[in-house]
């Protein structure tokens, strides 16, 4: 299990790429997404940037895979992510000191 994502296009910022990938993979309306920060998992020579975002709504929209990359999509509260069967590399990163704290 993992999160949405993909490679950056030439000249694209991590935040621009994350929003583009989210739209491509879920069809979510980008106007409903507020980017709130990012966390870098640095591997010396390459890095993975996790971009944090919140929805500008109290009622999350239904999610349906739109591009064949995912078989299932769902909303998961931040405090429940570590309970999921995560990809081992992401699980190790998520459990580290830079992991996200639940927002109030």
Image (cartoon, grey):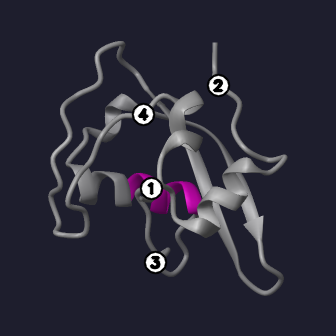
> Residue at (44%, 63%) from the top-left corner?
5
Q: Which residues are magenta?
A: 14-20
Residue depth check, mark 2 versus mark 3: number of the one nearer the observer: 2
Q: CA distance from mark 1 to mark 4?
A: 11 Å
| Dot 2 or dot 3, earlier in sequence | 3
Q: Are marks 2 and 3 in contact (CB under 8 Å)?
A: no
| Dot 1 or dot 4, earlier in sequence | 1
Q: Quadrant of residue 43?
A: bottom right
| Dot 3 or dot 4, earlier in sequence | 3
Q: CA distance from mark 3 to mark 1?
A: 19 Å
Q: CA distance from mark 2 to mark 3?
A: 30 Å
Q: Which residue is mark 1?
A: 3
Q: Which residue is mark 3?
A: 9
> Is label 1 in a helix, a strand or a loop?
loop
Q: CA distance from mark 3 to mark 4?
A: 28 Å
> Which disc number belongs to residue 102?
2
> Residue at (36%, 12%) from the top-left corner?
58
Quarter in which the N terminus is drawn: bottom left
| Dot 1 or dot 2, earlier in sequence | 1
Q: Nearer the viewer, residue 28 or 62?
A: 62
Looking at the image, residue 28 lies above or below residue 39: above
Q: Which residue is mark 4?
A: 76
């Amino acid at each position: 299990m993992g999160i949405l994502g993909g490679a950056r296009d030439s000249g694209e910022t991590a935040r621009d790429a994350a929003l583009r990938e989210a739209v491509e993979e879920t069809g979510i309306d980008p106007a409903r997404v507020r980017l709130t920060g990012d966390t870098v998992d640095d591997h010396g020579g390459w890095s993975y940037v996790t971009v944090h975002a919140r929805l500008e709504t109290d009622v999350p929209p239904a999610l349906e895979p739109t591009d064949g990359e995912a078989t299932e999509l769902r909303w998961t509260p931040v405090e429940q992510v570590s309970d999921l069967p995560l990809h081992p590399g992401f699980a190790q990163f998520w459990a580290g000191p830079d992991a996200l704290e639940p927002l109030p």
